[in-house]
Image (tube, grey):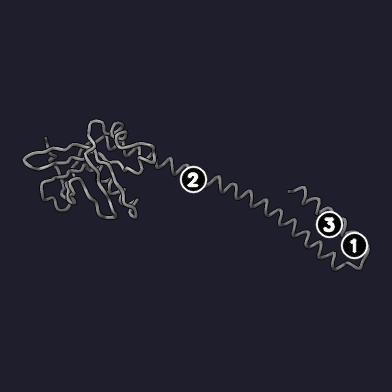
Amino acid sequence: MQLPKTVRQIGDVGGNGRVYIEDYVYTYLNQLKMEKRNFPLRAALFGHVYHKEGKTFYLVYGAANVVDELSWGRNEEQVRKEFFESYELIGYVNIYGNKQELPGKKDGYYIFYDKNESMQNYLLFCYEQKKGKRDRKERETTDMAGKSVSVSIKDLIKRLIYGSCIIILTIAVTSINDYDKMCGFAEAAGRAAAYVSAGQ
């Protein structure tokens, strides 16, 4: 077992357990906290567990939001095989708002720095998944907006036609005593009714 040399301590790390989280994983977990701050979440952790001199050391090289993965049709083992094959599923972190509970019920941990291509690839995959979801929503919104615009224009035309009919009726009422005007009204009303029927 070789522990990372360059580390940064966060919180209280006392007791028999030591948790070391790679920087990309730390960034990902913080991003999850910000995105889902009103919901409790559970992330699977991938890495290695070592036992030495009565202490347990957790080295975390990968993490995946369990709920997101299930919505994409995969479980933790499938994620591990695809992105973190050289690591084991070593536990979970439960995040509730700003509180998080790491393996061994630890609040404090160390952050370390590594190339960590596995986590980089996973982050890229998550970005593509979310981008695809946003693009689909935008297309649906655009489609809905197009339909509502075409429906609105059709409704506007109908309203204009009905409005014209009302004006014609008003003219008819005011000229009801004049026979010639009444005949002219009857012809105009007949044309308007035919136009409305054809437009529907």
Residue receiving disc 2: 138
| 3 or 1: tag closer to the N-terminus | 1
The crowd level at tag 2 (other Cα within 10 Å; few <14, some 14-19, many 20+) is few
Quadrant of image for the N terminus: top left
Q: Position of residue 11 (x, y in %)?
A: 16, 53
Count of labels shown?
A: 3
Dot placed on the residue nearer the N-terminal end, 2 or 3: 2
Which mark is on residue 56? none
Q: Residues within 10 Å of mark 3 (few under 14, many from 20)?
A: some
- In the orientation shown, which residue stands out farthest toward the left? 53
CA–CA distance in space, label 2 to label 3: 46 Å
Q: Give the alpha-carbon distance from disc 3 to disc 1, as whole Å.
A: 10 Å
Q: Is mark 1 on a helix, strand or loop?
A: helix
Q: Which amino acid does label 3 sit on?
A: Ala
**Rendered location of residue 59, percent (x, y):** 18, 40
- Residue under the point 51% across and 43% down: 139
Residue placed farthest to the right in the image?
179
Residue type, numbered disc 2: Glu
Separation of disc 2 and disc 1 at Cα?
55 Å
> For numbered disc 3, what is the local secondary structure?
helix
Task: State the residue at coordinates (58%, 47%).
Answer: 146
Up the image or down, 75 lies above or below 184; here it is: above
Report helix, strand or loop for mark 2.
Answer: helix
Residue that carries the numbered disc 3 in the rendered image: 189
Horizontal side of residue 40 vs 60, given as left or right? right
Q: Which amino acid does label 1 sit on?
A: Met
| Residue highlighted by disc 1 | 182
Closer-to-camera residue (76/199): 76
Q: Nearer the viewer, residue 82 or 119?
A: 82
Q: In which quarter of the image is residue 64?
A: top left
Q: How crowded is mark 1: few (under 14 residues within 10 Å), some or many (20 or more)?
A: some
